[in-house]
Image (cartoon, rainbow, N blue to C red):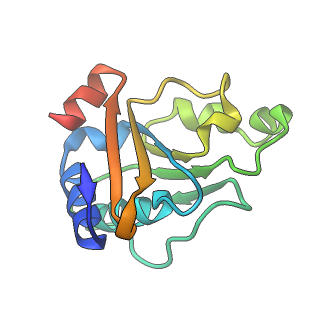
Amino acid sequence: MHWRDEGETRAFAKKLAAHPGVSDAYIELQGDLGAGKTSFVRHLLRSLGVEGRIKSPTYAVVEPYVLPSGSKRQLLNIWHFDFYRFNDPREWEEAGFRELFASPGLKLAEWADKARGMLPQADLVIHLAVLDNDVRQAEAIAQTPKGRELLA
């Protein structure tokens, strides 16, 4: 896919958010710095009904979100991970990440390669790359039956 602007990024995020299976999926976002990973997450979370500030978890490693009551979808929890600064495997256990990934809800992870070997297989991997004129090339790869459902 090619996303020529924020509108096209938002449109894909909105389609993905409309799928019931997204409420309990693990989606990995790959790409260089500035490729648009966090921007895509923001569009997805807004499309799901998250209100308020959506910030990058670069320093906190994880930002949790709970959909407000009365939202169009009853999603238990959403966790946005950014493993860019993750470098101590002990942190995985100490922070309770194993429990978060085992619990129901949407998990979104940037820089998952930094925690490789500790993460489960992603249902969906979205690889983003910046082309000329700030066009984003997005490749979505389903790795599980749930991932294939999300792309159908």
Q: Is residue 7 left or right of residue 86?
A: left
Q: Nearer the viewer, residue 38 or 3?
A: 3
Question: Taking 144 as reference, is 1 above or below it?
Answer: below
Q: Is residue 50 above or below residue 60?
A: below
Q: At x 75% / y 35%, what residue is drawn?
A: 92
Residue 110 is left or right of residue 133, and the answer is right
Task: Give how far across and how far down residue 12 sits, in percent.
Answer: 23, 56
Viewer-nearest residue: 96 or 28: 28
Give the residue drawn at x 33%, y 66%.
69
Residue located at (50% from left, 34% from top): 103
Q: Nearer the viewer, residue 120 or 116?
A: 116
Residue drawn at x 66%, y 28% is 116
* Picture mark count: 0
- Where is residue 73 drawn, in percent x and y? 24, 56
Q: Residue furthest left?
A: 152
Q: Is residue 68 visible?
A: no
Using the image, determine if residue 56 lies above or below residue 20: below
Decide if residue 26 is on the left or right side of residue 119.
left
Residue 142 is left or right of residue 62, and the answer is: left
Identify the image quadrant of the C terminus. Answer: top left
Q: Position of residue 21 (x, y in %)?
A: 25, 38
- Answer yes or no: is residue 146 visible: yes
What x and y, as percent, mark residue 84? 69, 50
